Amino acid sequence: MHSSVGQVVIFALPAVVVAAFAILAIRDRRRAGPAAGPGFVATNGWPVAIFLIVAVGLWTVFMIVLPMLSMIDLSFRPRLPPPQWGSARDIYTLENYRYFLFGSTTSTASWNTTHLKAFGLTIWVSILITILDFVVCYPIAFYMAQVARPARLRLFMLMLIAPYWVNEILRAFAFRLLFASQGVINRALMGAGITDQPIDFIAADVALYSGLAYAYLLMMMFALYNAIETLDRNQIEAARDLGAPWWHIHLFIVLPHAKPGIASGATLVFMLTAGALAAPLVLGGPRTLWFTPIVYDRFYQAFNWQQGAAYALILLVACVVFVLLVLKIFKLRLGEIAK
Amino acid sequence: MTAAVQLDRVTVRFGDFTAVDGAKLDIAPGEFFSFLGPSGCGKTTLLRTISGFIEPSAGRVLIDGRDMRGIGPNVRPTALIFQNLALFPNMSVADNIAYGMRVRGVPRRKRAETVERLLDLIALPGQARKRIDELSGGQKQRVAIARALAVEPQVLLLDEPLSALDLKLRQHMRNELRAIQRRVGITFVYITHDQGEALAMSDRIAVMNRGVIEQVSDGRTLYNSPETAFVASFVGESNILAGKVASVDGAVASVDTPIGPLRGRNVRGLRPGSQALLFLRPELLVPSADGIAARVTDAAFEGTGTLLTLAAADGRPLTVLVSGAAARDIPPKGAEIRLAYKAEEALVLPPDAAGDA
């Protein structure tokens, strides 16, 4: 990209964004009519309004829209040394996506099994971890939302949140220490005489899966808690009064009510787990190839940004498809899980 | 005959607080029984104790002669209608009504038949497929009743289910509830703070105050012959005058009140010299040639009668309900009039121990 083009983008885009938002505001005003009461500008003044429009607009465009667009663009370009980017040889191609499926043109294998397997494993394990997180969180969230008294609730919240004050990478290392061959768990097992030699939790991926499940547990926890908390306790009591056993109440009263929360929790946990980098790098066994480290390697080891962009996009699309699938299964609309 | 519900000195404590203190009464099968009292008097606690959500700290709850200790709400032969109804919003009307039968394993066909029958009973035929949020307040009310009746309870417990409705609908639902109760013939235990509701629907009423049942009787007796100062002041309106009993003459006592000696029925047999409250219903007082002197300060026409507000000799307000023939001749504002009443219709009661009323 030429520097002049960059300058145009930097100085012209804010103006375009402001104009676009202003037009939207005017259209909205016209549609809602004057009965909508004093507008945002009337109550807060133009300086505040312009600041907000520029700030939100720039944030959206520069932090979200432009990087995404450039990544999509990059993913369809061939691998070239940076001086040749934008030159005549920089044409659109499906090479990066072909590589993901079939691997190097010089390789004899018909499929790119390493990457495809890593991709499949990532998606499959992320689904399992999402389910695991739901199973772990549901009883705790139900207890916190419907049973616990305020004092107990505060204690629970603190106990849940406090470990997350520690950095994600440090937490991953803590899990590594916990599951190491001379770690607490192995020493406890051997001390108790259950095993006579350390179990290799790291190679068995126990450490990785525990670490991943723990990493985004709170996302599921608070999504569920918020959903269950809004359930009128009288409904639980009404079901009980009508003779329902406890499992029936959970299955047919609590879960249907918590559906949007379950869906949003599952979406968050799945997306974050599939995109997790720290835990797989620190806790991944020698034989496990998670997909995100491969993407990372495309960028920083192979210096193949084009391919990295393609891989990242593949993961993103897979995640979006999963979310839409979950919504379909739960018969929910996108707006409902954002509540 | 075994009582449908028998409370045997039921006491419920929450920590140091006694919500229900030694409640003891029998509710007959097929009776429409109400617990009436202000909020916080323990009536909801008592209802939850009968339904099984609360275990009594002392005493026993017997339903149809069976001690209910240790029997959870899901197996008791009671069904509770919650104040906010607690219908299941994610289910249709039919699924709501059928819920209790579903968890009891009633076959699908039988469930459908019962739902049909109950929808007819609550006058909502053909609404089975509707969603709960498509119903009006009164319709939700009826669905809640049908859902409770579907499990064929021996006792239906109702926790102020009409309080969310507007006045017109509330009055309509009173009649509806009474009619449904007559049709199904089971025992209804109704909780309310609205004396009008209790008086209009109930066979008998228990008036509760601070966890204690003050009086159990039919509405007419409750209104005309209250046994305690609390019941007299809570049920219906009264002019209340405090004083000391001056003399007792048979069933009638004379009380020295700030506006002079007044006579009333000595219900509890107070002796001369004891503290007493004299209760005068507004409709008992009639303008006459002599009696209590008072000045008219306000007159409010209320359709069936006119409510006069007067100032007595010491300035205290008195209310008088003038209706019937007398209503044609309302004294003007500022007029000095005298009020008479029949001594045996006024009540002389000892003040509450707690000092209220």
Image (tube, grey):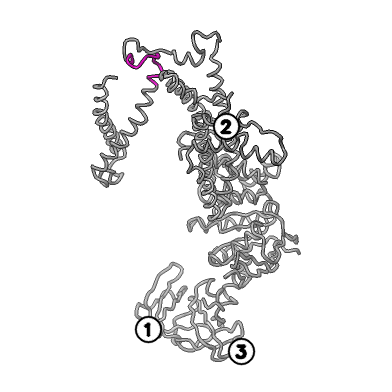
Q: Looking at the image, is B10 positioned above or below residue B124?
A: below
Which circle, 1 or 3, is nearer the viewer?
Answer: 3
Q: Is residue B4 above or below residue A295?
A: below
Task: Tell how many labels.
Answer: 3
Judging depth in this view, the residue of A297 and A213 nearest the camera is A297
Does residue B155 appear to the left or right of A266 in the view shown?
A: right
Q: Which residue is mark 2?
A: A208
Label 3 lies in what chain?
A: B
- Residue B5, x across and y down, in percent: 70, 62
Front residue of A243/A76: it is A76
The subunit letter for the residue under badge 1 reads: B
Q: Are marks 1 and 3 on the same chain?
A: yes
Q: Which residue is mark 1?
A: B336
Vertical placement of residue A215 versus B327, above or below: above
Label 3 crowding class (10 Å Cα cut-off): few <14, some 14-19, many 20+? few
Q: Secondary structure at mark 2?
A: helix
Relative to residue B337, is residue B216 depicted above or below? Answer: above
Please give the range of residues in magenta: A72-85
Task: Evaluate if marks 1 and 3 touch, with contact meaning CB atoms under 8 Å apart.
Answer: no
Disc 2 crowd rating (10 Å Cα; few below 14, some 14-19, many 20+) is many
Dot 2: chain letter: A
Residue B312 visible in the displayed image: yes
The answer to the question of whether label 3 and label 2 lie on touching residues, with beta carbons closer than 8 A, is: no
Q: Which residue is mark 3?
A: B250
- Compute the Cα span from label 3 to label 2: 93 Å
Tag 3: amino acid: Gly
